[in-house]
Amino acid sequence: MKSLKISSELFQRAKAVIPGGVNSPVRAYQSVGMDPPFITRGEGPYLFDADGNRYIDYVLSWGPMILGHAHPKVVAAVQQAAAHGTSFGAPTEAEVELAELVCKRMPHVEMLRLVNSGTEAVMTAARLARGFTQRDLLVKFDGCYHGHSDGFLVKAGSGLATGGIPASRGVPASISAATHSLPYNDFEAVARLFEKRGAEIAAVIVEPVAANMGVVLPESGFLEGLRDLTQKYEALLIFDEVITGFRIARGGASEVFGVIPDLVCLGKILGGGLPIGAVGGKTEIMQNLAPLGDVYQAGTLSGNPISVAAGLATLQELNDPDLYVALKLQTERLAEGLMHEFQRVKVPVQINRITGLLTVYFTTILVNDLTSASQCNTDKFRSFFRGMLSNQIYLPPSPFEAWFLSTLHNETVIEESLKSQHTALKSI
Ligand SMILES: *Cc1c(COP(=O)(O)O)cnc(C)c1O
């Protein structure tokens, strides 16, 4: 690997004018003790940096790039849309097409409102749930990330977990008090809370597969239990599928687990690498949004033609169920290959995985919630991360983030990654 001299110079410049040199904290490489590579371009499963290195990318812009970088059909769709004008603040046919496509792929979504980010999608879902139920309290789970709006920065996983920040400063106590956070996979804790305060709870929001404390799968019965309980108390169940939507299956988590939420939040893949978010659900609930109802939500650039074109092109490519069969197989191949090599050198790890997502935890214990995830050895992760980077493998710079695979992470790419792991493990 070539030294990151140019990237480091760029980072110095960045730090003078951008807080921490980055526009999102997870990019900062603070927790791995180095400066981040500056990226010049991406192509398929690869990223290229300003210093002339080529990496296999397991970050994929934190999820959206499921077709790999610069997919020809997505690029063409974006170019064509841009040439026709970038924003009108008026309805377009493509928005309708995208909404129709999502409703088809996720049959429990009858209506969809497009917004500009996952954060906005969750904010909107929360307001809608509160407006619909006329209740204030929200229940979330420790280590689940639902964007950076005030109400959700309680034990929020992702960058906060990496930075060791339990809750963000700047959030009024009165707002935090309206969100109750419980351990993931602890259904009994949710049942106890509902027994005490069920009449105040507007909604339970959950990542159906948690992917912001690393990947944590729902234990059997957990999602089903949340569905039954919310129904019984007339609260809503919100699935935050900003990561899992169109990734773990064509129709997302509901297709995998057979549990149907009242509302679903989407983002990331939905925009094919451009800014987007969406909240969808039953008409009965969705029609409470303005202009039909009095739950207000709006956006100057919402449904903008370029994001919509990229999203449509991406979802059309993802129509083929075989892509998901292959993605699942490749994820398994990578997880098993990694595990084999770790066992050979006697480094204990747990690898949690599902189609298109995995996390290597440097620990001997089963990881099923934030507490167990937090016990992993962060020093070992740091040296592994650095070893992998110097062998051209670009991983999320945090032990509490998911690795993402694209449909282009084929056998050759996986083999090359495992070879790098072999070399990296020799030097740590
Ligand atoms: C990324 C993410 C969000 C926030 O989306 P942004 O587009 O970054 O605002 C919300 N929920 C989950 C589960 C996410 O992974």
Image (tube, rainbow, N blue to C red):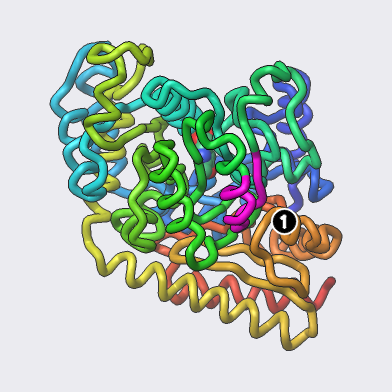
Residue 100 percent across, percent down from the top left: 17, 38
Residue 148, percent from left and from top:
60, 29
Q: Is residue 230 placed above or below 174 in the rendered structure?
A: below
Q: Position of residue 21 (x, y in %)?
A: 72, 28
Image quadrant assignment for residue 2: bottom right
Looking at the image, residue 412 lies above or below residue 231: below
**Does residue 55 appear in this view?**
no
The quarter of the image holding the N terminus is bottom right
Could you tell me which quadrant the C terminus lies in? bottom right
> Would you say residue 186 sits in the magenta stretch?
yes
| Residue 183 seen from this side | yes
Q: Is residue 346 above or below residue 282?
A: below
Instruction: State the residue position of label 1.
Output: 399
Q: Write down the quadrant of residue 360 in the picture.
A: bottom right
The range drawn in magenta is 181-192
* In the rendered image, the vertical position of residue 217 relative to residue 3, given as above or below: below
Q: Which residue is drawn at 25% across and 11% down?
A: 291
Residue name at image x 59 percent, y 60 percent: 216
Furthest residue in direction bottom, as rendered = 344
Q: Which amino acid does label 1 sit on?
A: Pro
Please give the name of the residue rendered at 57% of the width and 43% of the height, measured from the top-left corner.
Answer: 195
